[in-house]
Image (cartoon, rainbow, N blue to C red):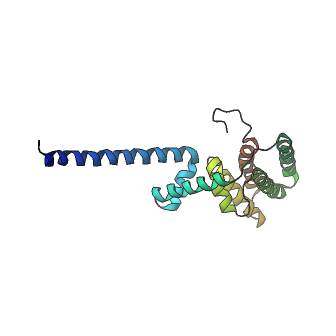
Amino acid sequence: MSTGTLLAIIIPAVVVIALIAVALVAARRRRRLQDRFGPEYERTVEDAGSRRAAERELAEREKRHDSLELRPLQSSERDRYAREWNGVQEEFVDRPQEAVHDADRLVTALMKARGYPTEDFDQQVRDLSVEHGRTLEHYRAAHEINALSTRQQATTEQLRGAMVHYRALFDELLAEGHRSDSTGS
């Protein structure tokens, strides 16, 4: 076989192998991001307009998240936050709107205690999405209802739902770093 023939066979084979490798790496990255971000992955793809842009954004979120100085709570802090949450739940019976506002403030205080920046809701969502992508829709829904409540437009049933939504994220933030699961988180 001539050198030209060998090159005509080898070069396309190398290109095909390289394309397969790139596709495998991209698929592995996509799967890792989908696993890590849960439903937030698809939401980000929809918002970004393409998988590539969304995956770039999610990678940037991971990088920012890695730079945060997040910390688990000490036992005494967890106990204090749990007591405060119980107080907010008790408040709901007589003052549902105020309880939802207090739940929002308590979740924000808990985020801050854990090391999350809390100045901007959109940034909070992006930062939380890295570790709490599966509970993020709860937080968004609670935040929306809290805003309705501020305008006196939320029903008691919506307020009750907000408390359930806040509780989902609250429980994760409170327990994080103190679970005995196989991932070590």
Query: Does 40 sit left or right of 27 as displayed?
Result: right
- The image position of residue 130, as x and y in percent, is 62, 50
Task: Name, please, the residue furthest toward the front.
Answer: 3
Q: Residue at x 86, y 48 (%)?
A: 84
Give the residue at x 73% y 46%. Answer: 173
**Viewer-nearest residue: 31 or 146:** 31
Residue closer to the observer: 40 or 177: 177
Snapshot quadrant of residue 77? top right
Residue 105 position, x and y percent, is 80, 57
Q: Residue furthest left?
A: 1
Q: Position of residue 15 (x, y in %)?
A: 28, 49
Specify whether residue 37 is in view.
yes
Give the total number of marks visible in the rendering: 0
Q: Position of residue 22 (x, y in %)?
A: 38, 48
86 in relation to 67, above or below: above
Nearer to us in this view, 121 or 162: 121
The C terminus - image quarter: top right
Q: Can the viewer see residue 45 in this picture?
A: no
> In the image shown, does 83 or 32 lie closer to the viewer?
32
Image quadrant holding the N terminus, namely: top left
The residue at 66%/36% (across/down) is 184
Q: In this picture, is 53 found above or below 24?
A: below
